[in-house]
Image (cartoon, grey):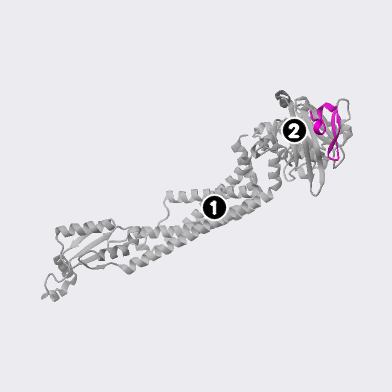
Amino acid sequence: MSGEEKRLTMIDLARVSKTFPPDVHALADVSLRIRRGEMIFLTGQSGAGKTTLLRMLCGIDRPDKGYIEIAGSDLSRISDNELQKLRRRIGVAYQDFKLLPDKTVAQNIAYSMEVSYRSRQFIISRTKQLLTELGLMDKLDALAGKLSRGEQQRVSIARAVANEPELILADEPTGNLDAETAGLVMQLFRRCNEEGVTLLIATHDQAIYDYPGSKIVRIENGRLAIQKPPVIAKQGEGRA
Amino acid sequence: MNFLVAVFSQTWRSLVKSWRSQVLSLVTITLSILIFTFFYLVYNNALQFGNRLDNDLRLIVYLDEEPDQTLQQEYRHKIEKFDKVERIEFVSKLEAYDRFKGQLDDSQDVLKDIPKDFLPSSIEIYPRRSLESLSKIKEFSAYLENLPGVLKVQYGREWVERFNSFIQLLQVVVFLSGGLLIMTTTFMIGHSIRLTVFSRKNELELLRLVGASNSYIRVPFFLEGALLGLLGSAAGMAALYILFRWIRAAFAETAAQGMFSFSFFDTPTAAMIIVLSVLLCAGGSFVSIRKILSV
């Protein structure tokens, strides 16, 4: 890969495999390259390996084999300190939300900005802006544990987006949402994408990716199956 | 938001969240500090008492012959070679006779037929009034007994030895209570940190996931430990001061109080105890958090 190509690449996976004991092959020989500023939908059935892939991209799990590079950083060689710095540039909306139930919505969202030492003013205005966009402004001071699943999901998305990351990884971001609120979330993601943010959205909600020009990577039984358009992802040795 | 604001706000949140365990740690640290400082205060006062010993503490070296000026210089040189002393006085046979006569008052007649040189000449050595010199007094006496021309060495042996034993016992007690302080403080800090980590498990996990640096996670615990150390030692010192005032008031009229003036720590010593407690607690929490969270 040339220097210019490397600069333009946000995610680079080469022959990544992951097996969980005793012998669950979550990912097998997955190669994928995503350029900066792209919005990719990672689709597939439950258990196909989407969440495993996202967890490895944010450094929670490590691959058994293969190579992962995010924004030019090789995750297998990165120090703990560098990984933490990298995580501040990645926003993750987890499938299980990872919210603190005894904290307010505002406090939950603020965490991602506080670790980057954002100003108090920025944190407050950004939190209000995102909650307004996601239709949750009236829940600003509500405890996260008291919210519905759909509301918690939106708070988790707001936290992922809040620190203006370069990369957003979203795991089933519309899984608990009705069509209208899913539309709000997608609107937010598109706006981020237009601002240059790279997005990788793991979903099996066809409604959010079924539009002309969408870029889709399908994963089946831990292997990349279909890519649309094919130029962004390659299987096995045929990696670009 | 800068680093300091962020960690102070984290510290505050953590204190609010785990205040029960913090109060327990605070009470333990206060009691440990109180126990240690009490014995240290007694020890400190005993040392000062040793330094204030009156002139009665002297070594009397009886000589078989009256030393001339040259021999006196030689004795003086040999004595000071062993240890610095406050002063050395040579008492001739005649001076010894006059002193004895003066002590007899109305019974001086008994000396009528006795020659004026019947008492031996002597050297009176006044050791420095410090514990270091007092602790060496036995060795000093043995050294003097081996000097040429010395018949006998006399001093308040029993009193000095008892005082030395008391000081040594106090040293052991201070040492043990210091050890107890270190153990209880580090144990309680470690325990408190463990409880805090447990109660904030999800929050700490989230902080790692959103990219909090090791310092961002570690420093609030460090500050928490330092704060516990500061409050615990300040409370312990305050309790000791109240106890000290009570003891002084209760024993103000006794004879013991007259010869043993009981004083509190001076400001630098009190400040040093507080600073050391803060460092101990902060260090304890730092080690615990590294061990528990591996950050």
Q: Chain of mark 2?
A: A
Please state the horizontal and vertical placement of residue B12, each as a whole percent of the image: 62, 44
Disc 1 crowd rating (10 Å Cα; few below 14, some 14-19, many 20+) is many
Please report the residue visible at 26 percent of the width from the left and 56 percent of the height from the top. Answer: B81
Query: Can residue A159 be seen here?
Result: no
Three-letter amino acid code at the position of disc 1: Gly
Q: Are marks 2 and 1 on the same chain?
A: no
**Is residue A222 within the magenta segment?**
yes
For the N terminus of chain B, the quadrant is top right
Q: Viewed as shown, does residue A230 lie left or right of A128?
A: right
Query: Can residue A95 be seen here?
Result: yes
Depicted B130 relative to depicted A19: above or below:
below
User: Helix, strand or loop at disc 2?
Assistant: helix
Region rendered in magenta? A214-240
Q: Which residue is mark 2?
A: A161
Image quadrant in which you'd find residue A160: top right
Q: Viewed as shown, does residue B200 lie left or right of B103?
A: right
Q: Chain of mark 1?
A: B
Q: Nearer the viewer, mark 2 or mark 1?
A: 2
Q: Residue furthest front?
A: A237
Residue B232: which numbered mark, if any? Answer: 1
Residue B213: which numbered mark, if any? Answer: none
